[in-house]
Image: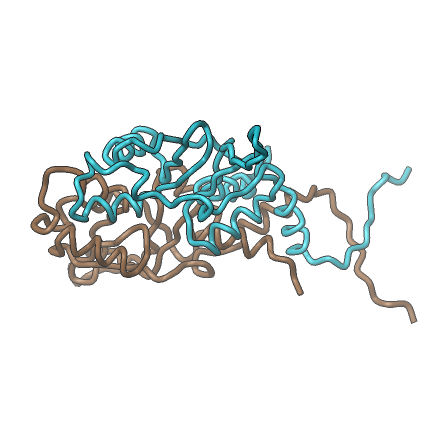
Chain colours: A cyan, B brown
Amino acid sequence: ARPKVGYFYSQKPTTSLIHDYIRNIKVLDIKSKPVTVSENYSVYDSIVTLFLNDVGTIFVESSGYLVGAVSRKDFLKTAIGSSDVHKVPVGVIMTRMPNIVTVKDTDTAYEAARKIIEHEVDSLPVIEVVKDELQKEHYKITGKVSKTTLTQLLVKLGESQG
Amino acid sequence: ARPKVGYFYSQKPTTSLIHDYIRNIKVLDIKSKPVTVSENYSVYDSIVTLFLNDVGTIFVESSGYLVGAVSRKDFLKTAIGSSDVHKVPVGVIMTRMPNIVTVKDTDTAYEAARKIIEHEVDSLPVIEVVKDELQKEHYKITGKVSKTTLTQLLVKLGESQG
């Protein structure tokens, strides 16, 4: 008996399959835990938090909502400046909402990578929009996608199977 | 006339095509320009070089050969410490050869990504091994592959075509 084999016709080159595949991976599937501090933390304590968690970006929360982001680059700039890192609160040097580039669970890994490159940032907070009793919108942070997350994804895609 | 179409048989799932594809991309095809300073540069001047070139890692050369690497994280650690960044030479705080993880032009993008994740670094120097008149091996730096390079690659792979 002839074996049942699947023949299929494809005009798509391999690269087309690749980008379909990459565009099907969702932020929800790859996001990692964000590290957050509160706005009145000193720059110094925030840097310590950065080192203790070995991350590149710290997100800043106020009343449980995302209000800012600070990268290693921002911290370095402040650290070599003249201000006292023990006295300056992180809220003073952070990038403040609405200037933070964000993604949602339903966005694709591709979209996250594109935003990181386009906006020249290291990490994006994954957010959920919630409304308070006055119908004002707030962002809750549920994760992050960083260049590290995406490099890990590339490793996973390149891993040989079994 | 019937159009010439290609039929092909494949037992491979799509993910298998993906990792074959990713493993065929070479470091040579994706590497970017490295930023280097000499060993006697001060930490401060190296940080300035880092900012002016907007990179995350500085490589250190001596007599044209790679001798060290310093990341934003290393600089931040020094900057919040008690040492005078204007006086300390970058050679004091750098990670020194042979403790630097490197790749070659012929390695794959996958291999570079794997090394970055495994060794928890942001960037790898792309090197070429050369021998001096005493047959001693030295490393010449010809480029770098960073998490940014690999995130850019992911964007390229995910881009729709035409």
Q: Quadrant of the C terminus of chain B?
A: bottom right
Q: Could you say which is closer to the camera, residue A43 or residue A156?
A: A43
Closer to us: A152 or B107: A152
Q: Is residue B137 visible?
A: no
Residue positioned 83% across, 66% down in the render: B4
> Which residue sits furthest left?
B87
Q: Residue A111 location in percent, x, y?
A: 57, 49
Q: In which quarter of the image is residue A49?
A: top left
Percent x, y of residue A114: 53, 52
Front residue of B159 and B7: B159
**Above or below — where is A132 with respect to B29?**
above
Decide if residue B17 is on the left or right side of residue B37: right
| Percent x, y of residue B40 | 11, 55
In the image as oriented, which residue stretches furthest toward the bottom?
B1
For the N terminus of chain B, which image quadrant? bottom right
Decide which of B51, A17 is in the foreground and name it: B51
Residue A2 at what x, y percent from top left? Answer: 89, 40
Q: Which residue is drawn at 39% across and 35% down?
A: A60
Image vertical order of residue A64 relative to residue B66, above or below = above
Q: How many marks?
A: 0
In the displayed structure, B42 sits above or below B64; it is above
**Which residue is depicted at the point 29% across and 33% down?**
A46
Task: Decide if residue A37 is in sight here.
Answer: yes
**Residue A160 horizontal side relative to residue A82, left or right:** right
